[in-house]
Amino acid sequence: MPTLSPQNTALIVGAGFAGSVTARELAEAGHRVRVIDKRPHIAGNAYDERDAYGVLVHRYGPHIFHTNGERIFQWLSRFTEWRPYEHRVRGVVDGRPYPFPINRDTLNQLYGLDLDEAGAAAFFERVREPREPVRTSEDVVLNSVGRDLYEKFFLNYTRKQWGLEPSELKAGVAARIPVRTNTDDRYFTDAFQAMPLHGYTRMFEAMLDHPNITVELGVDFDDVRHRIERDHTVYTGPIDAYFGYRFGHLPYRSLRFEHEYLPDVAQYQETGTINYPNDHAYTRITEFKHLTGQQHTGTSIVREYPQAEGDPYYPVPREENEALFKRYEALARTEPDVTFVGRLAQYRYYNMDQVVGAALVAARTLIDTLR
Ligand code: FAD
Ligand code: UDP
């Protein structure tokens, strides 16, 4: 069994949400914590910084915080103040932006209708292609909105984002996107929706600012795994990498981010994000000032180009990948001195709040069993 007790040392691999939340909890329980990350910065994929023009940007794509977990929100609130922010998105079809997720206004604008709520419900009922069971992302969308809306908003976006057909992805991917008969055009409806007032990186700095925590950046676990003395390891990188890809590579989808600063443009687009399902090699453009509320004479945007190679950003939710993950997970269970937590280590399409929740549980388990 694990051997950590107060004043023993934990090595934490990864300074993203999974690693930093666990680090803080262990430190407060009296453990010494050494955090390493191979990148030159903390905050993992939530990392933000001012670009060369002074605009606060998210280096790894737009990160919007939303949760229904009050406990999670309160926990993070110890390390940041918040700026209320409700994200809105448009999906461009045939050159025109429509509210997305699809709602009643989307139907009315797209088809020149004047539906009320009951009319929208009847519309969906008429066009949907019932699927039973609903297994894939194709099933989810056809089952709820039918073929035309599927082809206009989902099919090509999904092909671009994943390099796969919606029928090759589990239902959970497209099920992230709701369908509405009302006119709510918010991307999320969670009870808590807000951005860290001074950015994510500042929030992480506060989280890691504890006398029991040291942070070393630019350090790859592979280079030090046999050298660093510790009583326990918390690993938040890709689980297949930890085991030297023994059973083969787990597929992760990557992105290339194209950041651009536009001088003397106060606002580039009407909403924080605009999705381009059918045009361009990128999936979406995000304008950061919407998210952060920053005032600036210019504006900064990012385009996301999906690709197979590169940093692992998304686990790819498919049956066969999850079967391969299970084999790694079984191997992980034979390593009682290592905790695997986070989006890459648990191979789950987690949002930030879910990673915080998973890390709080992992830390609690560790603290309780190791006492
Ligand atoms: P990561 O943030 O990936 O942190 C893992 C860390 O481990 C990394 O810093 C990495 O460098 C380090 N590491 C890996 N291997 C090693 C090694 N061998 N040695 C040392 N260090 C190592 N979530 C939301 O809730 N809202 C959003 O709007 C949102 N938007 C997103 C947009 C994009 C484009 C992406 C990719 C993700 C988005 N997410 C969003 C998800 C969010 O990024 C993740 O849930 C969260 O950041 C995962 O935290 P983590 O600690 O598990 O992983
Ligand atoms: N999706 C789509 N069209 C869109 C937006 C999303 O088909 O305009 C599908 C696509 O498969 C995508 C998934 O829904 O990968 C989840 O979208 P979300 O915006 O939640 O993705 P994330 O922000 O995690 O990249």
Image (cartoon, rainbow, N blue to C red):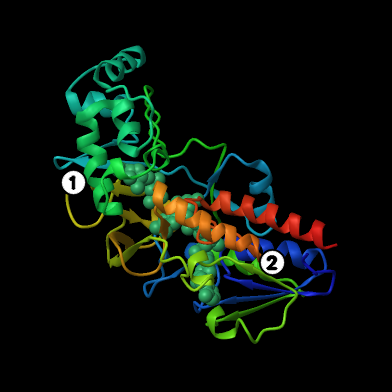
In the image: residue 251, left or right of residue 151: right
Look at 29% across and 47% down and name the residue there: 274
Nearest to the observer: residue 105 or residue 211 = 211
Look at 20% across and 37% down and name the residue there: 152
Which residue is disc 1 drawn over? 278
> Which of marks 2 and 1 precedes in the sequence?
2
Which residue is disc 2 drawn over? 23
Q: Position of residue 79 (x, y in %)?
A: 66, 59
Residue 351, relative to residue 9: is it above or below?
A: above
Q: What residue type is labelled 1?
A: Asn
Q: In which quarter of the image is the N terminus?
A: bottom right
Residue 230, relative to residue 364: is it above or below?
A: below
Q: SS of the residue at dot 1?
A: loop
Q: Which amino acid does label 2 sit on?
A: Ala
Look at 23% across and 41% down and name the residue there: 155
Look at 25% across and 38% down and name the residue there: 153
Q: SS of the residue at dot 2?
A: helix
